[in-house]
Amino acid sequence: EVQLVQSGAGVKKPGESLKISCKSSGYSLTSYWIGWVRQMPGKGLEWMGIIYPGDSDTRYSPSFQGQVTISADKSISIVYLQWSSLKASDTAMYYCARWSGGPPSSGWGNFDYWGQGTLVTVSS
Amino acid sequence: QSVLTQPPSVSAAPGQKVTISCSGGSSNIGNNYVSWYQQLPGTAPKLLIYDNNKRPSGIPDRFSGSKSGTSATLGITGLQTGDEADYYCGTWDSSLSALFGGGTKLTVL
């Protein structure tokens, strides 16, 4: 059974750093891209970026480029999303999701499995 | 404001049919596949339709998808109260970004 299990909720202060994780099981991590999606309170889904754990090829949405870092440790089947300096506006639910299909730039694919979400709250 | 435009809300009575539209452009829907996601209250999104009109295993045939030009449509027949959720369309864009629509809240009256 394919599962993506995310790390627990966190409360941080502005300026602090944070790294959240997404652990995959039930399939070969190095065969699929994993993406991150933000959902701010009461708002819709926003794609942040995507990584291919097999070779760490990473693509970012222009809106999130330079704001976050996506990385992977394929030896333990975990993909990470990290911030070096959080802002209050980073308060949101963050989902990881598996991309199934061709390479993202091929235009063919979808997010077929999703993690349960990690709630990040940034408040002074 | 999302590049993919969806109506903010739709509603219909139990047993009825509803459609949700997703309008984009030639750089996204016009040249790429569309998927649809259902997000029940307080839960993670779930894949409902992929490759414009295919259903993953376990998704009932009450849900259907179609695409024409730069627009896509999700159809739901035999509405149930359990279908109340937010629905999002998704696709890829030539700017090398994945896109989601703004979401549509379905109310089953």
Image (cartoon, coloured by chain):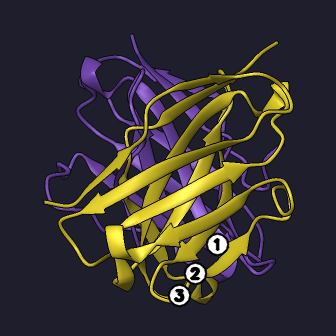
From the image, tell me which residue sits under label 2: A104
Instruction: Return the x and y of residue A94 as percentages of the image width and height.
Output: 57, 40
Taking depth in this image into account, of B48 and B70 the one nearest to the observer is B48
CB atoms of marks 2 and 3 within 8 Å: yes
Label 2 close to label 1 by CB (< 8 Å): yes
Question: Which residue, given by chain and number where applicable, does mark 3 sit on?
Answer: A103
Residue A111 screen position, x and y as percent: 44, 62
Instruction: Classify residue B103 as left or right of residue B40.
Output: right
Task: Name above or below for residue B80 compared with residue B67.
Answer: above
- Rendered purple, the chain in question is B
Distance from the alpha carbon under mark 2 to that under mark 3: 4 Å
Question: Which tint is chain A?
Answer: yellow
> Marks 2 and 1, Cα distance to the nearest angstrom?
7 Å
Q: Secondary structure at mark 3?
A: loop
Label 2: few (<14), some or many (≥20) within 10 Å? many
Q: Nearer the viewer, residue A71 or A16?
A: A16
Callout 1 secondary element: strand
| Mark 2 residue element | helix
Q: Chain of mark 1?
A: B
Residue A39 numbered tag: none
Q: Which residue was labeled with disc 1?
A: B92
Within the image, what quadrant is residue B28 found in?
bottom right
Badge 3 crowding class, 10 Å Cα cut-off, few under 14, some 14 to 19, many 20 or more, is: few
Q: Residues within 10 Å of mark 1 (few under 14, many from 20)?
A: many
Q: For the residues carrying marks 2 and 1, which lies nearer the camera in this image?
A: 2
- The spot of residue A4 in percent (x, y) is 32, 53
Q: CA distance from mark 1 to mark 3?
A: 11 Å
Q: Residue at x 84, y 53 (%)?
A: A67
Above or below for B64 versus A103? above
Name the chain letter of the residue that bears numbered label 3. A
Direction from residue B24 to residue B106 in the image, left or right: left
Quarter holding residue A41: top right
